[in-house]
Image (cartoon, grey):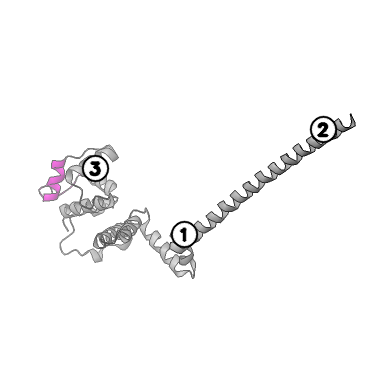
Amino acid sequence: MKLGEKIRYLREVEGSLRGLNRAMSQQELVRAIAHETGSKLSQSYLSQIENGSRPHLTNTTRQLLASFFKVHPGYLVDDPEGYSPELQSEVRHLEDKLDLWLVAGAERFRRDPELKQALLTIAQQEHTRESLLLLESILDTPGLAPRLAEVLRPGPRDQEANQGTNQRTNQGSSQGASQGSRGLRDQSGKGKNGARKAGTKERARR
């Protein structure tokens, strides 16, 4: 893959990660780099890179683009003749490959919004490989995945049960408050009756 093709592909990936559902335009990329890094890159320079008229990046530009796209600087060069991505060092570029693979999967399943978002969320993690290994550990632990699902993604029955519990709690609180009010009124009434009786007795003695 040529350098220009890689930059175009990274613009597509970045657009998906930012929720554009399309590739970032060259102008959008230039503006984002200026806003988020404080560094400037002209659109004409970017266009020359992508169309192949400028086949090489300066070291400063390579570091800038690698930092923005969160890829290894060594990725931003033309692949050698006869190069196959399958022969690439798994250690050096594993995170980048996983992220690109997840984003590509998200686009493939874009008709399923929840699955698409799940794949993009994993791709946006700083340590993608560790996130996937953690998911494997969760699924391999008997009973853990269902318990997490009940807490993090409660189904309709669980939501109804929680609502019922809340309603009963609220009803109990209301009943307790009502009984307390009646008790206060009863005590108040007894106090008033007692005062009236005491006054009657006093007048009778007089």
Q: Which mark is residue 159?
A: 1
Mark 1–mark 3 Cα distance, whole angstroms, equals 54 Å
Q: Is residue 174 visible?
A: yes
Q: Position of residue 100 (x, y in %)?
A: 27, 58
Crowding around mark 2 (Cα neighbors within 10 Å: few <14, some 14 to 19, many 20+) is: few
Residue type indicated by callout 2: Gly
| Above or below, comparing residue 116 to residue 181 in the picture | below
The quarter of the picture where the C terminus appears is top right
Who is closer to the viewer here, 25 or 62?
25
Crowding around mark 1 (Cα neighbors within 10 Å: few <14, some 14 to 19, many 20+) is: few
Kindly identify which residue carries mark 2: 199
| Above or below, comparing residue 115 to residue 18 in the picture | below
Asked whether 125 falls inside the magenta stretch, the response is: no
Kindly identify which residue carries mark 3: 60
Q: Secondary structure at mark 2?
A: helix
Residue type indicated by callout 3: Thr
Residue 140 lies in quadrant: bottom left
Residue type indicated by callout 1: Gln
